[in-house]
Amino acid sequence: MIISLRFRYTLLILAFLVTDRAFTEFVFVNEDDGVLNRYNYVLVALSLYTIGRNYRYLKGLMRGWLWVLLAGLLALALESFAGWGSWLVYPHVFSKYTALLPIFAVYAYYARHGLPPLELLMRLLLLGLLTNLLVYHPEALSLSAFLDNERGFGSTSAMLVLLPTLYYLNEYLTRGGLLRLLVFFLGLGLIGFLQHRSVWLALGLALPLNGLLLALGRVEGARLTSSRLLPIVLIPLLLVISGGLAVLSDPQVRQKLDASVQDILHPDKQGTGSWRLRQYESYEPFLREYPVAGMRLKGFELPIQFYAPDSDQPVWPDWTGHHFHSFYVDRLFYFGGLGVLLVLLVPVLQLGRRLRQPVPLAPAAATLAVFALSMLVYGISYDWPPFFYAMLGLALAAAAPVWVPRPTLPAPAAFPRPVLSPLALLSTTDHATAAAASDSGH
């Protein structure tokens, strides 16, 4: 009997995924536990070690991107030493750079060894997420919790639910199986029930983009037949008829859903969107003053600019860093437009190039690419969680551009050359002279 050991290749990506609160809650009651902070330093060391061991598998844009990142780290260290006499004066600012190291570690590792068994990875993700919800937050699964906005999960954990949701949709359309389709609907329902509007928006990008890839035949092995598509329509219809309609017709439920939709449509007037807008407006003068390279280390020393609306106290204490609820605002504040480009330029180019290539993507590669691109929307409302950089590296490894040979022009048809006699090589005059000589007996 042959025992497959490929499960061990999931360990690297799991080392980053377990930093999400849905997994750390099994061990640590306090999400700010000092052990977790030290574990982040372990992950930085692990990333550097993995990059060193697999450096030769970083090629092209990925290798250039790594060297640009390292040059940025060196420049920041030199700035720190020149201005503060310490090579690492404010680790919070340096962490904005070191957070990118897992991208290269995960990419290089899986470019060398091949993708981990994603079926196992998705099962572990679902098992961990659902177990956390059932053990630590069972009250979040009630209708009263839905109405009172008691979510149970944080937004990062809810975003993680999107990954197996997309995976099992593509697996169902590729390999069939009613259980896979039911898991897809389970994830979809869970995302809707948890009411993280930022995840709703990410889902709103992910599903149409995934559907477009399927419709264009860009997912290898996907079969959009009536036998596959009909259950996708019938199952929600049966759920609505069997009791879902009664829930949706409840005035409180409708009012709650309407309020959530209005929060999305009018983020400047209500909900957490208005809170984020006020935070942005508090820092807008500094974003305009340092648009190219941001405030960097000076930004850490800037007093907190955002105050609670019901008091004159800052939302966070000074000297803890500025905690922006937007990936884009965070990067613009610390590193300006260059900081945003440092993170986004290469992934968008690589994934965009692969999606445009005529070669279909494997279902897992399509899932990871769509999930990575959906984080562009999620980043509007929240800073990216640490585990996502590792997932981005996995997506770039799975959906790396492939070499497509250019079509060659057919060779010109070969025509046989006529065989000419020696006389044919002579001119008309030479023919006449040769004939006269022959008649005169020469």
Image (cartoon, grey):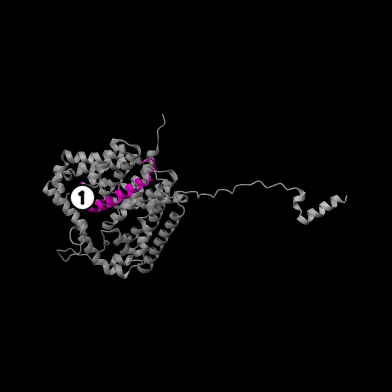
Image location (x, y in percent) of residue 313: 18, 65
Look at 32% across and 36% down and name the residue there. Answer: 176
Q: What residue type is labelled 1?
A: Gln
Tally of numbered discs: 1
Residue at the extreme right: 441
Look at 18% across and 58% down and name the residue there. Answer: 271
Residue at the extreme top: 1
Residue 49 visible in image: no
Q: Name the residue under label 1.
A: 195
| Residue 391, above or below 176 | below
Look at 44% across and 45% down and name the residue there. Answer: 112
Chain part drawn in magenta: 193-222
Image location (x, y in percent) of residue 41: 34, 53
Which secondary structure, mark 1? loop
Magenta run includes residue 214: yes
The rendered magenta stretch, by its main secondary structure, is classed as: helix
Image location (x, y in percent) of residue 222: 36, 41
Q: Left or right: 281 with respect to 78?
A: left
